[in-house]
């Protein structure tokens, strides 16, 4: 049974990969032949996207599923290039892709197409912020993504969870860039951190309720230690976001979130360490204090974590 199951999974993966590669080669050929006709490219992209949505709802073939993934990505690129070349408007292109990303989950049932829709939706919103140079809205977009990832992890629509996770990590990576490398830097990154901390407080409340912790002293210790850790990195929202991902993924048992959150946190810490906004002495002191707090938290929460694993 196990060998048959492994073989079945292998055949499914090969089928999807075959369909994906076949569709990409075909679309690549079409893309090269009509590259000089942007309007035709945009129209063909719309036709291909409609075909993808129809096939996704009616077909049960793994090969066609793989073909739908590659074709949908190519169709979105063709629509974007066609609109950009025809209208010369970044806003029009971003709004069109935003509308498509909203319509896709309404008519599709496939996991990968929903993932693509979430990524395109968040990417379009970021493009609107970036092209219009309203970078202050980044600090509203970050907590909204944190809240969306939290909601899809705790309650429903888990089919979108990984899409919001990837979008959140990419945006945190943008915030983790130094002020010299990041357009629109205005020194207000602490706003994102404070709003992320608010989401963390909500997650802590859920964890405390799950553990049935009723002693006021234990509650205060949990909130105080966690908030102190977050406040030490209040000027590094990427680190605050990475801690949120790890905390939420541990609570929900989401392995993908744990792995990606851990790797992202290591990367964000390295970015913060080489940030020129603070002196090396200050950053070293913050990191030493954070490490000591982690060790202290481990001793304090050791028994609590054992209860958590049992539950």
Image (spheres, helix red, strand yellow):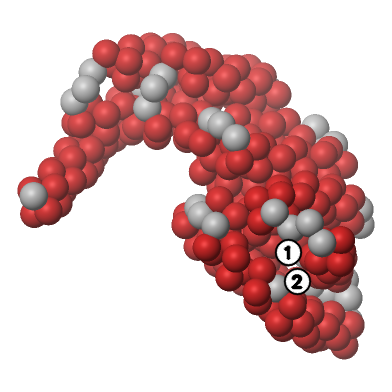
Q: Nearer the viewer, mark 2 or mark 1?
A: 1
Q: Give the distance between the C-alpha atoms of the residues marked 2 and 1, in whole angstroms.
A: 8 Å
The numbered disc on residue 41 is none
**Percent from the top left, x then y, of residue 283?**
83, 80
User: In the displayed structure, does residue 151 sit left or right of residue 131?
Assistant: left
* Residue located beneath label 2 in the image: 272
How many residues crowd around disc 2 within 10 Å: few (fewer than 14), some, or many (20 or more)? many
**From the viewer's perspective, is residue 98 above or below residue 243?**
above
Asked whether residue 126 appears in the rendered view, the answer is yes
Q: Is residue 107 above or below residue 113?
A: above
Which residue position holds label 1? 239
- What residue is at 61 percent from the left and 23 percent from the top? 98
Instruction: Answer whether residue 199 is visible to the viewer in this image.
Output: no
Residue 264: quarter of image: bottom right
Identify the element where label 2 is drawn.
helix
Left or right side of 261 for 70 = left
| Upstream in sequence: badge 2 or badge 1 | 1
Is 49 displayed left or right of 275 in the figure? Answer: left
- Rendered residue at 18%/46% (across/down): 9
* Location of residue 5 in the rendering, given as x and y in whole percent from the top left corner: 13, 47
Camera-nearest residue between 154 and 58:
154
Q: Position of residue 182 (x, y in %)?
A: 77, 56
Percent across and percent down for residue 294 are 73, 78
Q: Secondary structure at mark 1?
A: helix
CB atoms at circles 2 and 1 under 8 Å apart?
yes
Image point (54%, 64%), residue name:
309
State the residue at coordinates (22%, 26%).
64
């Amino acid at each position: 049974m196990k060998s048959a199951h492994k073989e079945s999974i292998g055949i499914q993966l090969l089928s999807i990969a075959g369909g994906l590669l076949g569709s990409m080669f075909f679309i690549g050929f079409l893309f090269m032949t009509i590259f000089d006709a942007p309007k035709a490219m945009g129209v063909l992209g719309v036709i291909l996207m409609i075909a993808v949505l129809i096939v996704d709802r009616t077909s049960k073939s793994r090969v066609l599923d793989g073909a739908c993934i590659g074709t949908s990505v190519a169709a979105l690129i063709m629509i974007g290039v066609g609109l950009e070349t025809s209208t010369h408007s970044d806003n029009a292109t971003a709004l069109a892709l935003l509308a498509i990303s909203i319509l896709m989950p309404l008519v599709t049932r496939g996991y990968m197409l929903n993932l693509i829709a979430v990524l395109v939706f968040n990417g379009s919103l970021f493009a609107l912020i970036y092209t219009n140079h309203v970078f202050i809205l980044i600090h509203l977009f970050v907590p909204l993504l944190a809240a969306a990832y939290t909601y899809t992890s705790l309650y429903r629509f888990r089919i979108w969870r990984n899409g919001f996770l990837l979008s959140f990590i990419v945006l945190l990576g943008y915030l983790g860039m130094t002020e010299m490398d990041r357009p629109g830097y205005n020194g207000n990154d602490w706003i994102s951190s404070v709003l992320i901390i608010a989401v963390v407080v909500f997650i802590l409340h859920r964890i405390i309720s799950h553990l049935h912790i009723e002693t006021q002293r234990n509650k205060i210790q949990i909130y105080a230690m966690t908030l102190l850790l977050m406040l030490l990195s209040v000027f590094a929202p990427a680190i605050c976001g990475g801690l949120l991902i790890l905390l939420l993924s541990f609570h929900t048992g989401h392995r993908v979130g744990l792995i990606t959150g851990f790797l992202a946190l290591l990367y964000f810490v390295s970015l913060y360490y080489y940030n020129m906004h603070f002196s090396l002495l200050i950053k070293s002191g913050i990191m030493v204090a954070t490490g000591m707090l982690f060790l202290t938290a481990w001793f304090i929460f050791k028994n609590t974590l054992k209860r958590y694993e049992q539950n």
